[in-house]
Amino acid sequence: MPSFFIQRPIFAWVVAIFIMIAGAIAIPLLPVAQYPNVAPPQISVQTTFPGASPEDMYQSVTRPIEEELNGVPGLLYFESTSDNSGRIQLTVTFTPGTRIGEALVEVQNRIRRVEPRLPQAVVQQGMRVEQAGTGFLLVIALRSTDGNLDAVGLGDYLNRNVMGEIRRISGVGSATLFATQRSMRIWMDPDKMLGLRLTANDILAAIRAQNAQVAAGAIGAQPNPITQQISATVLVQGQLTSTNEFGAIVLRANPDGSSVRLRDVARIEIGGESYAFSTRLNRQPTAAIGVQLSATGNALATSNAIQAKMNELARFFPPGIEYSIPYDTSPFVKVSIEKVLHTLAEAMVLVFLVMFLFLQSFRYTIIPTIVVPIALLGTCALLFAAGFSINVLTMFAMVLAIGILVDDAIVVIENVERIMAEEGLSPREATRKAMGQITGAIIGITLVLTAVFVPMAFFPGAVGIIYQQFSLTMVVSILFSGFLALSLTPALCATFLKPIPQGHHEKGGFFGWFNRGFSRTSKRYSGAVGHIVRRPARFMVIYLALLVGLGWAYVRLPTAFLPNEDQGYLIVDIQAPPEASANRTLDVIRQIEDAFLAEKGVSRVFAISGFSFSGAGQNAALAFVPLKDWSERGPEDSAQAIANRVNGKLMQIRDALSFALSPPPIQGLGTTSGFSFRLQDRGGLGQAQLAAARDQLMAAASKNPKLAGVRVEGLPDAAQVTLIIDREKANTFGVTFADINSTISANLGSSYVNDFPNAGRMQRVTVQAEAGQRLQTPDLLKLNVRNAAGGMVPLSAFSRVEWAKGPAQVVGYNGYPSVRISGQAGPGYSSGDAIAEMQRLAATLPAGFGYEWTGQSLQEIQSGSQAPYLIGLSILFVFLLLAALYESWSIPLAVMLVVPLGVIGSVLAVTLRG
């Protein structure tokens, strides 16, 4: 092949130009990401069960769904959360590489199969099944600059005009509304209802009957007489549209012609469908949408598309409304890629200077300088064809490959130059002779180098995806380098180089000084090698000692899946006391805002009340704290430094437990950095025993120096009121349990009745008791139920209440009741040390309790077990190729014995860098 290209250099240039064109076309089309799509694909199942306790929700809703999900193809694990806000969420995680579309259909089918077993209230609320991730890509916030719209108005506008547009963007997995849309709220007054002998069931039945959509048909519909000349659709005003119309609903017609209407026993307004969430940006109220990335979405492209769509929608906003994106994870992706591109350019310049230093000729230096960009462009073309992205790993592979790409070209140039100098041949003849000598060597070098990286491409799971993109980028670069070394490089040598005059190697000035110094160094090195060869036993002992030292140092290296980095923002998990109201939680948020905004490195604080990654409820909150640009912050204002300072202030807030945490290294592998541990009740011992095991484990972890910040991710046990019904008394009074349940649910938990048309959309009609009528236990006991004789019977006649503490949230993991525990490694320890220590502590728990790892920790454990096999397989491949190349078993062994000496440098560098 080299002879062909030496004879036809233009052909070699045409091939190279085709490669460059393909790369130039591919580069703008390649997606840009921080890492390959490593996070396992996830599907979220969400529903609500208003008024139900977490344990009831888990047993009657979550558990049947979990049983049905077992056996879904590609299932890795699933986790469920049922909390006292009535919210149920299951996150189903699949193995990397699973086709998320097919998995979504399978999960939807299984949900449909289980629906007949679920409570009717849950089926009526509906179940949302969609792609989802564990963290938010970004948050969109809307605020009213003139105060004309309250939080409900802003939330309704977001839901009507923004949510649908965002969900349709490619790459968006789900969008969560942290606000509420409007609803027709019927606020019942139980005292007035008692005076008029009405119950909640009477109101529900009247609304259903008098606010109904009627399909009336048409006048003159076929079949009709031949003489019929017209046909017209009949419209019946069945659905009500205003508060006055709902107020006029007749609850009872009296014999004297009077009637009792809904407005006589209830206050009616167009309010919010839910009051669970509120959001704030730098102390100002907002309404917001949290956007999660789909399993196949690209973070940077999706973020850019969302910002473009919001700029488009902003042109149609009413006066006084403006939007902002207070939290966005994509800037770190951009900065990471920019830094790697700078490193790539710096590597090219440094390589050029080093080559020029040793080759000492512009003509010799320019040849490998031309070849390297061509090989990199060809690599980009094949990355695009393989569906890869420009990310930190593929770019790192290209940076690493530059040295290998240059090596092949230098081998050709040096041999051509030597033959011209020694034999006085012309460049063309010298190139032809040189390629005859080294073609086999170049092919051998190329095969050996690819053998190092090819095995990495075949490992499964998230770790396999990371190794795959890195290794295949290296392999493609090396193959292009080998091809160009056999095609373009000899063509350039034959046409670009000049015959070498006598005395070519005799240099003066700087190059003369450098050559003399290099010659002296080479002679000393040769002497040292001769000295070592004459004393093999002594130096073999030294070699073995180095090998033992390498093994000792390697096993002591700290382990981690990926290092934590300053990603430009922090996450704050906030838990107020279990019985805290939303107002108390808001007071805590204000203190946290003050603590962060006092830091000069903080850009803004966005807080969500009523929601956190630990669960939902009035005592839960979450804050995102974007920091100023990295160029505006020094080491004293790094993300970790700010978190450490602010955490000291947060510990002084007595009314809440809150932590400022760094995000996970890879989006989708958990919600924060650190380990993710799941303590499981595998023996069916119950929530009380699970809580006791949790407390035992937490007490041991808090005293362990290898662990730090160990905490329960979830809502703490909260006060619960148990209504104890005397069944015999209830039967004596003629009260049915169905009426008892519906009365309590409608008054305290709210009931979704049906829908009404409002400004072009169908929105919900919701019934609930007035806030002042559901504050204390006496309010519960004075609720009345109609008996079989038509009389009104208060709950206090046949029931009593008891106070107790119980779970505010029930978590399930792979079908077992669980506790979510997270934390970090202690100072001076790695995440691998923390994982091992948690496993040791969990082994001391009573029988019946088990544990599993999830998220990033699971991937770290899997990657740790795979790494030795990966390294061993690469070494085996290289050995076999060398054996085939040299037709010898001993020569490859001698070559492979050098490998540990190179690893010593890597281990030493990692140790010194900490």
Image: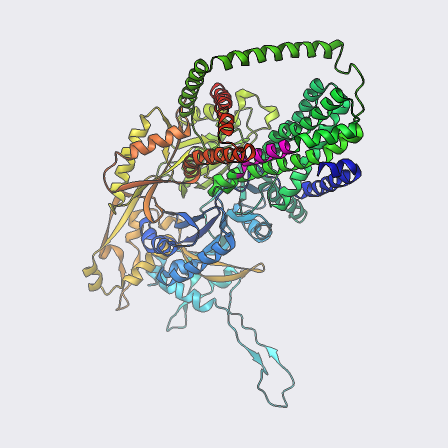
Which quadrant of the view contains residue 16?
Answer: top right
Residue at point 77%, 29% (across, down): 429
Residue found at x 51% / y 31%: 888
Question: Is 873 placed left or right of 392 in the picture?
Answer: left
Q: Position of residue 442 (x, y in %)?
A: 64, 32
Q: What's the colour scheme?
A: rainbow
Q: Position of residue 208 (x, y in %)?
A: 43, 66
- Looking at the image, residue 410 lies above or below residue 543: below
- Quarter of the view holding residue 408: top right
**x then y, percent, for residue 33:** 59, 39
Q: Quadrant of the N terminus?
A: top right
Image quadrant where residue 475 sits: top right
Instruction: Name which residue lies at 29% across and 48% down.
Output: 777
Whether residue 554 can be seen here: yes
Image check: 844 left or right of 121? left
Residue 852: in magenta span: no
Nearest the eye: 168 or 220: 168
**In the shown orientation, is residue 503 left or right of residue 219?**
right
Relative height, residue 675 to residue 761 (above, below): above
Q: Looking at the picture, how far across and down is residue 872, in whole percent? A: 45, 34
In the image, the segment drawn in magenta is 440-454
Whether residue 453 appears in magenta in the rendering, the answer is yes
Number of disc labels: 0
Seen from the viewer's position, the closer of residues 380 and 871 is: 871
